[in-house]
Image: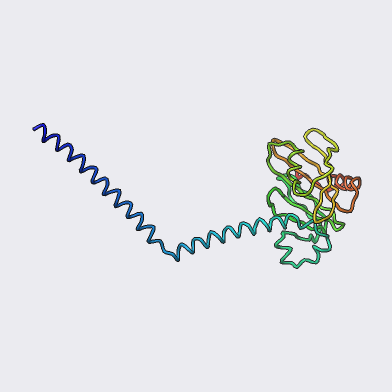
Amino acid sequence: MEERSTWRTVLGVLSIIILSCRLLFTCSNMNKSSSSNIDPVMENFRISQEEMKENFRRQREIQNKLSNDILYSDYEKLDSLPPLQKENYGILKLEKDSLIYIALDTQIKIAKNYYLQNRHDDTLRMAFKSPDNMNVFIHDFVSKEEIEPSFKSLKNSSNLQKFKVENTIGDVKALSYKITKENKRYNGYALCFKNDGFLNFYEFESDKLPLDKLKARAIDFFSHNMKEKK
């Protein structure tokens, strides 16, 4: 009797093993069958869609880079661009003096005939160009770094030179610098603010004005064109 009981136990274990093997074999065949039954037309379509998404992403990156640099072109060149190209670059020539919001309670006045770019690409909130080829860029972003290393990172593709802290009042710094864009040298003067890790840069750049006159233009601009909404 004991021998029979032992054999029954052995047979039971073997049955379980055999059933488990059959189940694994069946699942394996189903997976192979599923893989082999993929519609080649649908698979090619899927691959094509992925390639289109990747190409679109790359084109968008290129377009954003071109858009962010377009204001370094001469004012006359911007005037000569076709309307569709201006639209693609996100630039608009203002037909009248305009108030643009830069915060919930703050507006900035931009004069008639300035070119405005207001696309919110990357860290660039907005930018504008005067008829005498002065550029103004407004960047804002969150950073754990201090003002100076953050600004250097912002300009790391522009051959930043002669970087200098001109003045510091609390968390506000005035910076002077030089950069190279489109084979031109630009003087730069920036007013930089930091509040709770949020950085804000107002950069005034010109390939015509010397630094002292650019600084005067920047201070005058802030004095007359920043409007607080009450």
Q: Quadrant of residue 90?
A: bottom right
Quadrant of res 176 = top right
Residue at 23% across / 42% down in the picture? 16
So how many labels did they put on this image? Answer: 0
Q: Position of residue 15 (x, y in %)?
A: 20, 43
Q: Is residue 149 left or right of residue 22?
A: right
Work out whether residue 154 or residue 219 is closer to the camera in this orientation and state it.
154
Q: Residue at x 74, y 45 (%)?
A: 154
Dividing the image into 4 quarters, which one contains the N terminus? top left
Q: 7 above or below 40?
A: above
Horizontal relation, residue 30 to residue 63: left or right: left
Q: Name the colouring of the figure.
A: rainbow
Q: Is residue 45 left or right of residue 126?
A: left
Picture coordinates of residue 24, whole percent (x, y): 30, 48
Residue lying at 81% horizontally and 44% vertically, measured from the top left: 190
Query: Which residue is at a point 38% across and 61% down the rendered structure image?
Result: 37
Q: Residue furthest left?
A: 1
Give coordinates of residue 86: x percent, y percent. 74, 63
Does 135 appear above or below 5?
Answer: below
> Observer-nearest residue: 202 or 53?
53
